[in-house]
Image (cartoon, coloured by chain):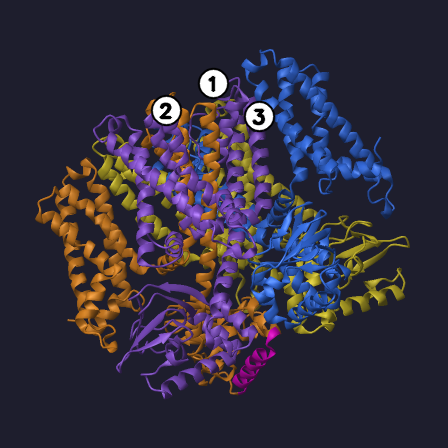
Chain colours: A yellow, B orange, C purple, D blue
Amino acid sequence: MISREALRDLLDPEVPGRLGRLFRAWHFAAVFGGVAVAVATSMDAVWSSSARPWLIAFVVALSIAFAVLYGLRIVIAGDEQTAEGETAGAARLRYVRSPMGLVDLMACLPIALGFAVGAPTQQIMLLTVLWVFKLMRYSQGLAILGRVVRLEREPLMGVLLAFLIALFLAATLAHLLERDVQPDAFGTMPKALWWAITTLTTTGYGDAVPITAGGRMLAGLVMMCGILVFALWAGILATGFSEEVRRREFLRTYDLVHKVPFFHDLGTSLIAEVARLLKTREFPVGATVVRRGQAGDCMYFIASGEIEVRTDARPFHLHAGSFFGEIALLTGGPRTATAVASKHSMLLVLDIADFRELAARRPELTKAIQDEAVRRQQRGPGRGAAAD
Amino acid sequence: MISREALRDLLDPEVPGRLGRLFRAWHFAAVFGGVAVAVATSMDAVWSSSARPWLIAFVVALSIAFAVLYGLRIVIAGDEQTAEGETAGAARLRYVRSPMGLVDLMACLPIALGFAVGAPTQQIMLLTVLWVFKLMRYSQGLAILGRVVRLEREPLMGVLLAFLIALFLAATLAHLLERDVQPDAFGTMPKALWWAITTLTTTGYGDAVPITAGGRMLAGLVMMCGILVFALWAGILATGFSEEVRRREFLRTYDLVHKVPFFHDLGTSLIAEVARLLKTREFPVGATVVRRGQAGDCMYFIASGEIEVRTDARPFHLHAGSFFGEIALLTGGPRTATAVASKHSMLLVLDIADFRELAARRPELTKAIQDEAVRRQQRGPGRGAAAD
Amino acid sequence: MISREALRDLLDPEVPGRLGRLFRAWHFAAVFGGVAVAVATSMDAVWSSSARPWLIAFVVALSIAFAVLYGLRIVIAGDEQTAEGETAGAARLRYVRSPMGLVDLMACLPIALGFAVGAPTQQIMLLTVLWVFKLMRYSQGLAILGRVVRLEREPLMGVLLAFLIALFLAATLAHLLERDVQPDAFGTMPKALWWAITTLTTTGYGDAVPITAGGRMLAGLVMMCGILVFALWAGILATGFSEEVRRREFLRTYDLVHKVPFFHDLGTSLIAEVARLLKTREFPVGATVVRRGQAGDCMYFIASGEIEVRTDARPFHLHAGSFFGEIALLTGGPRTATAVASKHSMLLVLDIADFRELAARRPELTKAIQDEAVRRQQRGPGRGAAAD
Amino acid sequence: MISREALRDLLDPEVPGRLGRLFRAWHFAAVFGGVAVAVATSMDAVWSSSARPWLIAFVVALSIAFAVLYGLRIVIAGDEQTAEGETAGAARLRYVRSPMGLVDLMACLPIALGFAVGAPTQQIMLLTVLWVFKLMRYSQGLAILGRVVRLEREPLMGVLLAFLIALFLAATLAHLLERDVQPDAFGTMPKALWWAITTLTTTGYGDAVPITAGGRMLAGLVMMCGILVFALWAGILATGFSEEVRRREFLRTYDLVHKVPFFHDLGTSLIAEVARLLKTREFPVGATVVRRGQAGDCMYFIASGEIEVRTDARPFHLHAGSFFGEIALLTGGPRTATAVASKHSMLLVLDIADFRELAARRPELTKAIQDEAVRRQQRGPGRGAAAD
């Protein structure tokens, strides 16, 4: 048995480590396998083949695994945030009611219910499509999108309202203009609405096409409105997105910058400025961060992990709180050493463009970096900045 | 009978309150019900069923209700802005001529006229589609869109002109290239224009498709132009939209910030900076603003309403002019109390990312907030910041 | 005969005035009339009707008018920029070679040539479609678009290249996957390219549709690439557009700000800041700029023209260099007077949001405006700020 | 034989020069010729014509040429960055493994293999489509796009995930709703997925169209989701693109600004500010940069090359490090001289809008430019600023 601690780490999509990666690989494979089964079993040729029992067994096995996982997640959810005086039961209920809790439940319950009420097995197999929601857990991007759509709710609803008004007007006019000529395609409002939505979204199936002069002019207008609606939506989301991305990156970096001792000696206002410019980047064990002789276009601060620097002399290690790669930025020359992540590391990257702008505005930063570099060289390569 | 005051509040889409919400719910239901009737009655199966008299009665009743509402709105419009020396009659005329006045008139007059001239009842029912315009009253977003389109009128017209030039050129060339091979689809300019607009908007019904080599190359070019036009439109609107949203938010916040006493002691320049960063958010009675133990990612200033703070000690109330949630921002720890809106409240939210940037640039803000927090604690939890 | 001066003003699309507006209205009507004739005559029903001679006469008359206009434009082009030592002939040649010169030539020459070589009259009528290019002269927006596309040439070409690579790959793969099953639709590369472009632009005529499993997967990928190409294009243009609009507005305003005496007393740096915020707006004679009692959301500086201010006292006039509407901004109350343009005026508008931000950053601006307002009131309403 | 140096210059797409341009023209012609052959030979009419041997010979000859080029590139790749202690062999291997190395290999190897294994010649001809990748070498824009997509990977994947979830849900629901009515179009999940992707991307072939009321409502929703996905993608890319373009321009300019002696006397912080505003522009020999008497909307700094200035006096030359065109900006008048590139020149352009903003913020820049202009005039036109 693994400990509760280890289990929590294993199920957390953010925690690095070999076992976690294995689990996530299995999870992805299970989800895509399940969806593939849903697609395959819907074809009678596959369903009536000899593969049927294997496919059913595969789905049943995974459903049971997902049910067990759901149970485990409920158990460990009890450990979260009990510090706030919440009972373990309340914390568990919170997970059960959360969107991810519902997704995890939907991955096993409907299939079990299907078998329980004796639904046709071929239909039950289709329910594995619901597993696709489980991927949401791994997507940072989706969370950002969700927040953007929520923040820009009001203008998005405004566009939707404009869309609805255009839709109903277009359908009514098309109905009036075309119903006598094409009763099959425009004879009732539902039919006209079907034409209107295919046209307003510029999908254009071609199953309902106006043929009168008036109907075609209307259709032309409707298509152009469709493009406008589309463009408005894109414009709103572009605006919201750009702000949200900037906000996230700043917050994540601010937290990391606080862990880097080098920045402690600088003023708070410089930290905020640096945090706005730094980008975070992860490096797994063994990844080459910088290669000797390459052109240098950024410098690195170590937020967590360990970096091995390989020079002509004996290689040395840098730990969280150190920085490297500054020489290429200060001199403009190529990298003088190769740096490899000897542990899974989180680095903060300062781009050369940002470095130069910042250095011009805040000369004390360049000075601090130069002082540090000099101090490091005096101690000799064997000690390195790792001593900080 | 309700008073004129209460009536004005009831009909104002922005005023909160139970009766107002009930009225708006009824209004929405009426509009959607009316449109649903228009859709349903256009189908002969519904029209010849026994539901017919009920549907007619439904529409007639709502039309009368909308006519009464129109009358009431004219009456209360007389009370607006008489301060500027305008007579009540002039103010009423202004409402009648305004877009919303026309929409309100269109909701009842055409149906009455339809019955008056003895039009077929099934056709009259279609007029309820016009009710969909009434939703415009509730959409802030639509007003923003209108302003953006008006401000960006010039470049949008430029794209429209480019669109028209492309349209006519494409149609003429397609007419010349395809008319001998497909006289049915490209034999005249109107037919060629129909093809051109379906292609330029990338709708592609498929009822007219070039088959000569030249026609197909032309079509490929036209499709790419369509994408370009689309992209230009999206680009223009994105730009305009982003500016308008920023402007609105700033103005709304600036007015609210002026109501918060805490900001009075700060300089004007700091107020303007804070106003640029704050976001407004409404909380109905009973809504939980902050929950104890949660991670804190923003602080709140109360512009109007009342907030109940629940700590281990006796709960206390904060009124307009106070702030709360600053401790989580200053210490980085979880929320130390739960805050619930005990009245309908308008809060100003300062995001943690903005707070940190601002605090770095303007250290006096952090100091003012800290001083205030200390003062509050010295008076004991029972009194709280509500005394400010 | 009208003078050369007057003629130049008449033909300039930017110069205001009654005659100029009449000319432009005629120009627009002529262009749209010509295009309408091209559309109408392409239909045999119209062509074989008794309207034929009238339509021909209409086009011939307009073509002659356009030829005369072309000649006049060549003549007056000789007056332009001779200050730089250029001969009148060189200036004329420059016009003839310019895009608008070519458009003006294309409006008459091809039709004349058509009659000269004895082309079928119905075909000659189609050439009036070329007149649509003449509208380019009136569109500021189109000029902006042209500049943006030129500036963003490099990334746009990059996307185009990606588009071409995707197009050829998609066509080749579809050709390989589908040619045996559907030789009619995918049997040769030109046919496959036709399918690829209809799919990559998401037009989807439906005349060529893959039916093999591989072909359909490929098609799905191609459609998603199409959306990506589209999105890239929109992104690039949005970026370029936003910068270009800002640049134009700034330059236009900077020139006007220099004409306003009030700004002369302020420092240069404040002028540049104000110029970035001001928006230009034109008001024809008799237009109401501000109405008494309305909420005030901006103030106005007069760059050119004359404004009549109507208060309780005797109305007075403000001339170029004055400003008005500042009281509503300073006090937050409604407008205290009505302002009407007594001549065609160009005003600079300072939005309330921008005013507040600016006033916070540069308190000297508020002071200067207040001083000016006080001085104006001391002189009494009869004299007004017009004396400045 | 040409030297190794000259060969490297010839193959570098960025190095200017007559021979390099000739080589690039040949390269472009070869690629487009090859693709045209692939398209032509796929048509049996062409293949069975007498042109067949010529087409084959053309492709074989070019393939051999590309193979030779590939070999040459491997050889000269050995010279690159050996300074970093890398052996020539390692540098060569790096090229072979790089994307462009693979593209160069793909241009010759598959065709050779095709002949080797005795594939049908008509099929081998299709492989020339792969040559289209060779154009990637010439596109700066494509490199920018690649970087943007890489940087915005996370949110783009989020949208892709949302797209996949919508796709599978839509397909499953459509399958359930329509399979009994239209087993041919929706009977299996693969068929339903085909419908879903054509609809979600708004391509709308029209080969599978829902006909039940439920199916059509679903389709309407799916189309609107498609627009949303599209808009999200556009929004993300617009954001990323705008940042990347700004970064590139800054870096390129910063390097060039350092080569201009005039800027050495200014402070570092002013250099960074200027570098943010300058745009780079290339002028081939003989190109006119500025024409006397034109309105001046920018000034130029020479980063490399030579400019001939033609005034009333004897013409003089300006070399790298000088600037010109500042008089029109300082006085607002027209250009006082004509400037022509007497060598291939790289200029830095300072736009009038940026100049005015910068001059307001940093008066020392205007002063430095004025001093320089005065000094230049004192020395007389014959010496010019070239002496700096």
**CA–CA distance in space, label 1 to label 2:** 41 Å
Quadrant of residue A275 within the rendered picture:
bottom right
Q: Nearer the viewer, mark 3 or mark 2?
A: 2
Can residue D118 be seen in this snapshot? yes
For mark 2, name the chain: C
Q: Amino acid at mark 2?
A: Gly
Q: Tell me, yes or no, whether the highlighted magenta stretch contains residue B367.
A: yes
The answer to whether D327 is drawn above or below residue C263 in the figure is above
Q: Amino acid at mark 1?
A: Asp
| The N terminus of chain B - image quarter | bottom left
- Residue C384 % position (x, y): 35, 81
The answer to whether D31 is drawn above or below residue D158 in the figure is above
The residue that label 2 is drawn on is C118
For mark 1, name the chain: C
Are the residues under badges 3 and 2 in a single subunit? yes
Can residue D217 be seen in this snapshot? no
Q: Nearer the viewer, residue B215 or A63?
A: B215
Q: Which residues are magenta?
A: B361-378
Q: Amino acid at mark 3?
A: Thr
The answer to whether C364 is drawn above or below residue B162 in the figure is below
- Residue C270 % position (x, y): 54, 74
Q: What secondary structure is marked by label 2?
A: loop
Disc 1 or 3, which lies upstream in sequence?
3
Tell me, for residue C172, which label it has, or none: 3
The residue that label 1 is drawn on is C184
